[in-house]
């Protein structure tokens, strides 16, 4: 059985690793967006595969993926971009879910959730309506729902389908927008 200092060290390690990945990814994306665009467009169909991997990596960061979706929409068309962004962002959501699950395990959250203030331990996080609706909150709503899904141990199959619905709808909106912008320029 682990002692409390070991648990705190494990939580600190997870948070430190996540912050480090966020910082490196944010720096990379912010400074090299034109290079990313050139690279993705130069490798043809493999650009879709690389883009899906980039989405999954962005799941570990606070960097939004919408600019990438606009870019892919302009490069590959709206249908390819919708599928690419939908699959990529759903993979990112699963990465965030597993990060939340690790945080929950490291902190023994399930044992402590009933003691949370304001009734937060009774949030209906495993409800499909909560999972879909809260994911549609602009900004960091999707990332928060993903982490909460893992922390609250939402069944994975339910989590994935409830993540996929708003993710593909949002992907289509940005993909068609990127395609339209690509036609303008």
Image (cartoon, rainbow, N blue to C red):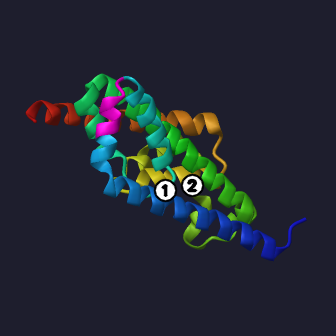
Q: Residue at x 41, y 36 (%)?
A: 51
Q: Main secondary structure of the magenta part?
A: helix
Q: Which residues are magenta?
A: 38-44
Is the residue under label 2 in contact with that under label 1 (CB below 8 Å)? Answer: yes
Q: Could you say whether the residue bearing mark 1 is in a helix, strand or loop?
A: helix
The picture quadrant where one finds residue 35 is top left
Look at 63% across and 48% down and name the residue there: 98
Q: Looking at the rendering, which quadrant does residue 174 occupy?
A: top left
Nearer to me, 152 or 81: 81
Residue 13 higher or lower than 162, as above or below: below
Image coords of residue 105 (percent x, y): 73, 58
Using the numbered discs, state the Cα–Cα distance from disc 1 to disc 2 in whole angstroms.
6 Å
Is 33 located above or below residue 164 in the figure? below
Front residue of 160/9: it is: 9
**Which mark, residue 36?**
none
Where does label 1 land, which residue? 144
Residue 41 is inside the magenta segment: yes
Q: Which residue extends farthest left?
A: 184
Task: Check the picture and name the quadrant holding the N terminus.
Answer: bottom right
Q: Is residue 141 left or right of residue 13?
A: left
Question: Is residue 160 visible to us here?
Answer: yes
How many numbered discs, if any? 2
Residue occupied by mark 2: 148
Nearest the eye: 100 or 95: 95
Tell which of 81 and 166 is nearer to you: 81
Q: Residue at x 67, y 49 (%)?
A: 153
């Amino acid at each position: 059985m682990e002692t409390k200092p070991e648990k705190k060290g494990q939580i600190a390690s997870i948070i430190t690793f996540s912050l480090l990945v966020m910082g490196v990814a944010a720096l990379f994306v912010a400074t090299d967006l034109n290079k990313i665009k050139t690279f993705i467009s130069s490798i043809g169909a493999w650009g879709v595969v690389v883009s899906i991997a980039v989405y999954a990596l962005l799941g570990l960061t606070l960097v939004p993926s919408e600019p990438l979706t606009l870019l892919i929409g302009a490069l590959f068309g709206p249908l390819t971009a919708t599928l690419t962004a939908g699959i990529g962002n759903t993979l990112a959501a699963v990465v965030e879910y597993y990060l939340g699950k690790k945080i929950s395990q490291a902190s023994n959250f399930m044992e402590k959730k009933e003691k949370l203030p304001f009734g937060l331990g009774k949030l209906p996080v495993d409800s499909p309506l909560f999972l879909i609706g809260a994911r549609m909150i602009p900004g960091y709503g999707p990332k928060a729902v993903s982490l909460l899904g893992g922390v609250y141990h939402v069944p994975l199959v339910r989590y994935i389908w409830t993540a996929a619905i708003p993710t593909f709808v949002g992907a289509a909106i940005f993909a068609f927008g990127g395609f339209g912008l690509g036609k303008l320029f």
